[in-house]
Amino acid sequence: MGKRLVVDPITRIEGHLRIEVEVDDNNVIKDAWSSITLWRGIEQILKGRDPRDAGLMVQRFCGVCTYSHYEASILACEDAFGVKPPPNARLVRNLIKGSQYIYDHIMHFYHLHGLDWVDIVSALSADPRKAVEMAKGYHENPYNCSETHYRAVQKRLTKFVKSGRLGPFANAYWGNPSYKLPAEANLIIVSHYLDALEVSKLGAQMMAIFGGKNPHPQSLVVGGVTSVMDVLDAHRLGQYQFRLNEIKDFVERAYLPDVLLAAPYYADEGVKGIGAGDKNFLCYGGFPLDDDWHKTLLPSGVVKGGDIANPMELDEQKITEEVKHSWYKGEAALHPYQGETDPEYTGFDGNGNVKGDEKYTWGKAPRYDGLPYEVGPLARFIVGYAQGHEGIKALVDSTLKATGLPVTALFSTLGRTAARALETKLVADQVQGWINEMVQNIKSGDTRTWTRCDVPQSGEGRGLDEVPRGALGHWIRIENKVIANYQAIVPSTWNSAPRDKAGQRGPYEQSLIGTKLANIDQPLEILRTIHSFDPCMACAVHIIDPKTDTIRKFKVL
């Protein structure tokens, strides 16, 4: 047996994630285990309640992905009720979710993932003049680019260092050999890290215009939306439009150029496929472009084993969850409509490590046709590229041409990070069309925002959608007009999944195999790959023991 390394908790994510790896004598990862170590509750609480209340409650799966679960629950109810919202409601939902995508992806790259690529300390030694020249090589008018500004950023960072209060820059692995950007590139991206703190607010404000507030918006109902006055108010549309223009400007002049700037220095990792995993990708389809979901901006489909020449259609019936290595009772692979959540905690061994072939996480193991699948921006772009999606193919091909990388470089941690940036542009460019479409509807006299509906005596429905972190599904079963069973499989459940009964690793685990650590005491490479998925563990685990009011007790030392 090789050396064991535990990273617990993985920071800069929502929730509690523990990664344990086994490395050989050359510090190459030979095995890995992904453990979600904190549980929470919603699904059992929903039993016996009016299904129309579920949307507001399931938002509490997480404090980040609130709208995602809200909409998925509403979609599940609409499927069970047999109701279709009017066009304006579809467009409002797209506008809310579109703004969420844009600011969530920006926040991920700069504040949750960027420091895995960018060495803050190195930026202090950069030449601001050379930084200006470098930035102009990736955009003719770079965002907030001047010697004066870059010197101010260095001064600000120096104050952090001298004060000893590094805040978000503390406890990192500065100087690690796996950092490859020159000092000037580090300075450029760090400056945008600080800019993005302000820019990301715009997206949250855009969500609140039609959602009522953010987080935890309140304007969706089964059958439509309630934000009628905002839809009919030209001033409110103007507020949304202004913020859209500002945030798109940042995407065009900062986010995309920064990714292109970093790519050549990490190109070898893309070519080698570091972080690729099994190359199985799954998407449900998101952002409906018609009222029947026949066409969506983001694709629905499956690519197996990286075979982009043979994309497949999605078959919902092939989705199951297993708990062989999860802290739950049961052995069967169950479809979500029959899903069970019966806890059985067994913990780790006496040394705090995974116990052989036993249970080791609160996360279940979703499978599609018996195999683990990755979900998220990379999955959407791989599936879309394989299907010949016009917008996705154009973005991917232009980026590959600009970087000189082969299409196979998409199957990597670098590709996962780049796909998220490209998706930000894809969605941002589409949002304007939805605004125009809604304005035309209103001008033509169509001001409908809700379709009347009633709770059925019994029924079942699912809400399948694409949210920033990937494929999200909510499944509801109704009996006697109340919820009899409710299950959710979220993006981070797919990606953080443990082994299944066949011994197949989940996407996080498989993506780490073969990765070499430059310094075993500074597992930067583990953070870089895991963060590229944009983990959200609070979403992935959401159960409670119905026999007691106590979820879990913790003592903080």
Image (cartoon, rainbow, N blue to C red):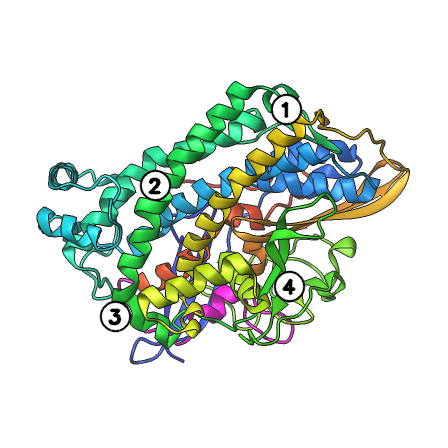
Range drawn in magenta: 496-523
Disc 3 and disc 1: Cα gap in Å? Answer: 53 Å
Q: Which residue is mark 2?
A: 250
Which-is-in-front pick, marks 2 and 4? 2
Mark 2 is surrounded, within 10 Å at the Cα level, by few (under 14), some (14 to 19) or many (20 or more) other residues, namely many
What is the number of the mark on residue 240? Answer: none
The answer to whether residue 442 is seen in the rendering is yes
Residue 223 position in % (x across, y down): 75, 33
Residue identified by numbered label 3: 518
Q: Is residue 543 magenta?
A: no
**Residue depicted at x 65% and y 46%:** 288
Residues tagged 3 and 1 counted as in contact (Cβ below 8 A) = no
Other residues around mark 4 within 10 Å, as few (<14) / some (14–19) / many (≥20): many
Sequence order check: which comes first, mark 2 or mark 3?
A: 2
Q: Which residue is mark 4?
A: 301
Q: Is residue 214 left or right of residue 422?
A: right
C-alpha span from label 4 to label 1:
33 Å
N-terminal label among 2 and 4: 2
* Residue position marked by numbered label 1 in the rendering: 227
Q: What is the magenta segment's predominant secondary structure?
A: loop
The answer to which quarter of the image holds residue 202 is top left
Badge 1 or badge 2: first in the primary sequence: 1
Q: Which callout, 3 or 1, points to the residue nearer the camera?
A: 1
Which mark is first along the chain, 4 or 3?
A: 4
| Amino acid residing under circle 1 | Ser
Dot 1: element:
loop
Query: Residue shown at 57%/54% (left/top)?
Result: 491
361 relative to 455 in the view: left or right? left
Figure quadrant of the N terminus: bottom left
Element type where label 2 sits in the image: helix
Amino acid tagged 3: Ala
Q: Amino acid at mark 4?
A: Gly
